[in-house]
Amino acid sequence: MTGSDALVLGIETSCDDTAAAVVDRGVEVLSSVVSSQVDVHATYGGVVPELAGRAHLELLTPVIGEALGRAGVSGRDLHAVAATIGPGLIGSLLVGVSEAKALALAWDLPFAGVNHLEGHLFAALLDHPGIEWPVAVLLVSGGHTLLVSMEGPGRYRLLGQTLDDAAGEAFDKVARFLGLGYPGGPAIERAAASGDTGAFAFPRAMMGDGLDFSFSGLKTAVLHAVRRRPDASDADVAASFQQAVVDVLVAKAVRAAAAVGARGVCLAGGVAANGALRAALAEACTEVGLPAYLPSPATCTDNAAMIAAAAWWQLEHLGATPLDAGADPNLRLPLLV
Ligand code: KG4
Ligand code: ZN
């Protein structure tokens, strides 16, 4: 116990990870527990929303208990309780939001409903508290691919986004097609490690064309290539596919940084755990003389520490969320106009 009055319990249940964390003043992570539901969904090759909601119901209370225990605190020591309020799967969001509200009521604490995308943007601050603004953030997850100019906490301008599939979705679909299993991103990365990135000349869609992305053509190109060459090794397909995604993401992130005079480039979201993407972005940033902010892989993928960090800032600057605020599966990132 730190004796601080600034401890936030964060809860994250927007998709298939049940997570809870205790964070002090939005920066010091006292505990961060993530219980993955991979075993629940692996048989189906993807997340089954109804099963995800049920698994959260079973896992969340023990996960919160573990987060409090590891931090060495009890409800009495907390300053606020926060949960992801959207976007995500409604049945999953409801579990976290309901439990957070109930705990806030029981412990007489403020509740903060946090935007999951904003949580991912705050993840970088946990590992790099000294970031100089503005930074260009490439937020690449299972459901979103956004390029954002972050001018500071709460100050975001949208620079580009995907017109179809999210980057993580492309990894998941290609992995499924190749029979590499779920979740697809880490499976592709593992397979790609022994493959040739030049084995297939997959398209780099919209490469020279603005800051938006498109990944659905790439996915189709992979399907056609494998049907044409059924003897091709999974490793070569995975490596060539991964390289095509990385090339586009890195080129646009660096271009976005130049467009807004950013003082650094930051990665966020589950795909940001990808080693090839991290290495390529670091190299491209070195070439243009900008720092690359790469949160640790565990901070990139879904976790509750990022939710508690965003909540602390939100409570300080915007106040508590009313207890009648509902979960919103389609919540958008709040943008500067
Ligand atoms: O941020 P996240 O954990 O959950 C969402 O908010 O969607 O991102 C999950 C996505 C999945 O599509 C997963 O396949 C991808 O991130 N991912 C990866 C890697 N680890 C997770 N993609 C590529 N390489 C990885 N190592
Ligand atoms: Zn996420």
Image (tube, rainbow, N blue to C red):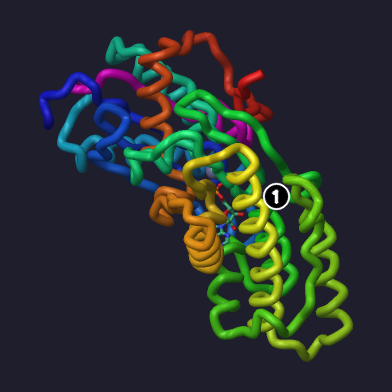
Residue 34 point in image, percent of width and height? 39, 47
Where is 308 relative to 201, above or below?
A: above
- Residue at image mark 1: 166
Write down which quadrant ligand 1 falls in.
bottom right
- Asked whether 88 falls inside the magenta stretch, the response is yes
Q: In which quarter of the image is residue 133?
A: top left
- Residue 239 location, quadrant: bottom right
Q: In this view, does 326 lie to the left or right of 73?
A: right
Seen from this angle, which residue lies furthest bottom?
231
The spot of residue 230 in percent (x, y) is 81, 86
Instruction: Name the residue at 84% across, 60% down.
Output: 217
Residue at 55% x, 13% y: name it: 325
Residue 166: say if magenta.
no
Give the residue type at disc 1: Ala
What segment is highlighted magenta in the picture? Answer: 76-94
Circle 1: element type: loop
| Up-down relation of residue 119 to residue 251 (above or below) | above
Q: Residue at x 55, y 31 (%)?
A: 93
Q: Nearer the viewer, residue 291 or 235?
A: 291
Mark 1 residue's CB less than 8 Å from ligand 1: yes
Compared across the picture, whether 149 is left or right of 169 comes to: left
Q: Is residue 323 visible?
A: yes
Name the residue rendered at 26%, 18% in the picture.
79
Q: Nearer the viewer, residue 242 or 176?
A: 242
Figure quadrant of the C terminus? top right
Residue 61 rendering spot, x and y as whole percentages = 36, 35
Relative to 53, does residue 280 appear above or below in the rendering? below
At which x and y percent is residue 87? 61, 32
Please indicate whether residue 130 sits to the left or right of residue 157 in the image.
left
Q: In which quarter of the image is the N terminus?
A: top left
